[in-house]
Image: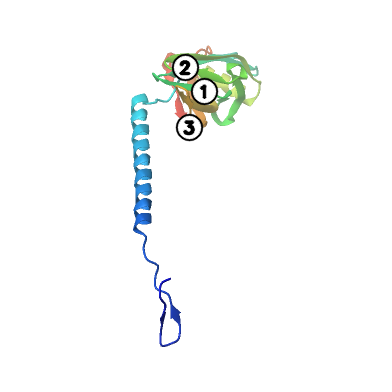
């Protein structure tokens, strides 16, 4: 037992415990090993990321038609097709249910949350293109369809829509899957007075966001 000392005030003070060099060395070795493992894991993940180099999926509008757009006071029936391209060599994509909405000018969503891909989740392998077709999607007669008929009758006859797709997406590399992320896609399309997709809008790449 270490000796004690007495001060003039009468308080007893114990000396500080002696350091244990073997415990200090052990702690330093454990910390060094942990930091080394952490650094090696980070380097391996970075190398794997560079090797895979994941790219975003690409959405395009390949077809779009608005039947009955010339007739004021009548319903407009939308049909068309989107395509999803997975450009990655080793990365596949899982999609949750895909929903499509169509917006028109100040009238907002004239079609809301229409199920694509049969309303079922979808897996897309690497280096593939998947079509998403829709048909018979009706816009009820009303102020929006009357405005479409007026726009189609004007000089040039271009009627513009915004097609929005929302879903969740998850990447898959070999047997490893990553977290789900929200997916938002915006496609600008325009049809002529005959209701058919204008050439300049065909195969136009859509904007994509994961927020």
Colour scheme of the picture: rainbow
Left or right: 89, with 181 as reference point: left
Q: Quadrant of residue 146?
A: top right
Question: SS class of the residue under badge 1?
Answer: strand
Q: Of the residues tagged 2 and 3, which is closer to the observer?
A: 2
How far is mark 2 from mark 1, CA to CA?
A: 9 Å
The first of marks 1 and 3 along the sequence is: 1
Question: SS class of the residue under badge 3?
Answer: loop
Question: In the image, residue 107 lies at what x, y percent?
Answer: 59, 29
Question: 68 and 91: which one is in front?
Answer: 91
Question: SS class of the residue under badge 2?
Answer: loop
Q: Of the residues tagged 1 and 3, which is closer to the observer?
A: 1
- Residue identifier under label 2: 125
- Residue identifier under label 3: 210
- Residue identifier under label 1: 94
Instruction: Count neighbours of disc 2 (C-alpha within 10 A) and say few if under 14, some if 14 to 19, many if 20 or more.
Output: some
């Amino acid at each position: 037992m270490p000796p004690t000392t007495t001060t003039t005030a009468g308080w007893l003070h114990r000396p500080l415990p002696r350091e244990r060099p073997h415990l200090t060395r052990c702690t330093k070795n454990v910390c060094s090993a942990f930091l080394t493992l952490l650094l090696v894991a980070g380097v391996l993940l970075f190398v794997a990321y560079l090797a895979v180099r994941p790219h975003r999926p690409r959405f395009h509008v390949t077809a779009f038609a608005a039947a009955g757009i010339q007739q004021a006071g009548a319903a407009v029936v939308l049909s068309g097709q989107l395509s999803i391209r997975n450009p990655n060599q080793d990365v596949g994509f899982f999609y949750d249910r895909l929903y499509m909405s169509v917006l028109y000018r100040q009238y907002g969503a004239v079609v809301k949350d229409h199920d694509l891909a049969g309303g079922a989740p979808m897996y897309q392998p690497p280096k593939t293109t998947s079509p998403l077709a829709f048909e018979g999607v009706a816009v009820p007669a009303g102020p929006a369809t009357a405005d479409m008929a007026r726009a189609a009758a004007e000089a040039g006859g271009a009627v513009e829509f915004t097609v929005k797709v929302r879903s969740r997406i998850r990447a898959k590399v070999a047997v490893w899957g990553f977290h789900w992320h929200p997916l938002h896609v915006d496609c600008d399309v325009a049809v002529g007075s005959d209701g058919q997709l204008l050439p300049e809008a065909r195969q136009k790449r859509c904007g994509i966001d994961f927020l």
